[in-house]
Image (cartoon, rainbow, N blue to C red):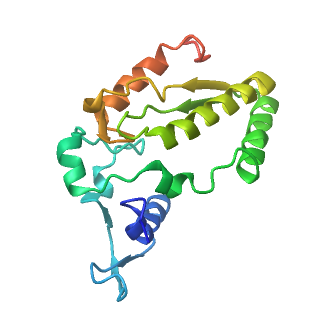
Amino acid sequence: MIESSATYKKRDRLKEFLRSIANPLAPVAIASPQTAGDQQTTEKPQPAVAGKKLSDFQPNGFLPIDIRFNPDTYFQKHPKVSGYYDSDYQDFKLSGEQTVALKNLIEFSKVRNINLVFVNMPLTEDYLDPVRAGYEQEFREYMQQLTAQTGLIFRDNSLLWPQARESFSDPSHLNRYGAVAVSKRLAQDPMIPWPVKR
């Protein structure tokens, strides 16, 4: 069996960590670092994810990561998985429950006069192999159609910096430098109706 995500093996730890953010006073069961088939849980007051504690997060929930993606060293530690085997795209469909939920969110936002902006984040060329690039193109076309039908504001940054590896912590996630650059870009985007200071 090919595993498609480094987080997949630790998904229970990630779920518990996210629960701890929502309710920091609740005890959290964390799997001990033993063999995969022999998991035991222990109570820990402050869980860690990838060496980070809850106190490492900024008050807005942002975890600033300084790592700069270098494919020469990254792929020595992590397998390079083709988009063909990437389980993130395994059930890729532009219809169904997620589409219904998005359309409901768009309608809810309209009724309450809330401007809804959907931002597609940048990806590297190392991530966008032909399979993933095809899925991403299909997704962009679908979102553009949805934008035309509903008035949703869709900002597509997926192809913004395909070679700017210094802005990423891995092939598909921005580091703190990339996140700041995207934030500045969005803050100046004339298509986003930002509130005006009075």
Percent across and percent down for residue 130 are: 48, 38
Residue drawn 21% across the image and 56% down it: 77
Residue drawn 34% across the image and 43% down it: 58
Percent across and percent down for residue 59 are: 38, 44
The quarter of the image holding the N terminus is bottom left
Side (left or right) of 112 relative to 14: right
Q: Is residue 74 above or below residue 122?
A: below
Q: Is residue 21 above or below residue 115?
A: below
Residue drawn 68% across the image and 48% down it: 93
Image-quadrant location for residue 48: bottom left
Along the viewing direction, whichever of 22 and 123 lies nearer the viewer = 123
The quarter of the image holding the C terminus is top right
How many numbered markers are drawn? 0
Residue 42 seen from this side? yes
Image-quadrant location for residue 66: top left
Q: Is residue 96 above or below residue 175?
A: below
Percent across and percent down for residue 193 are: 62, 16
Q: Is residue 148 above or below residue 19?
A: above
Image-quadrant location for residue 78: bottom left
Residue drawn 37% across the image and 33% down it: 125
Residue 115 seen from this side? no
Percent across and percent down for residue 167 are: 30, 31
Side (left or right) of 50 relative to 191: left
Along the viewing direction, whichever of 188 and 173 lies nearer the viewer = 173
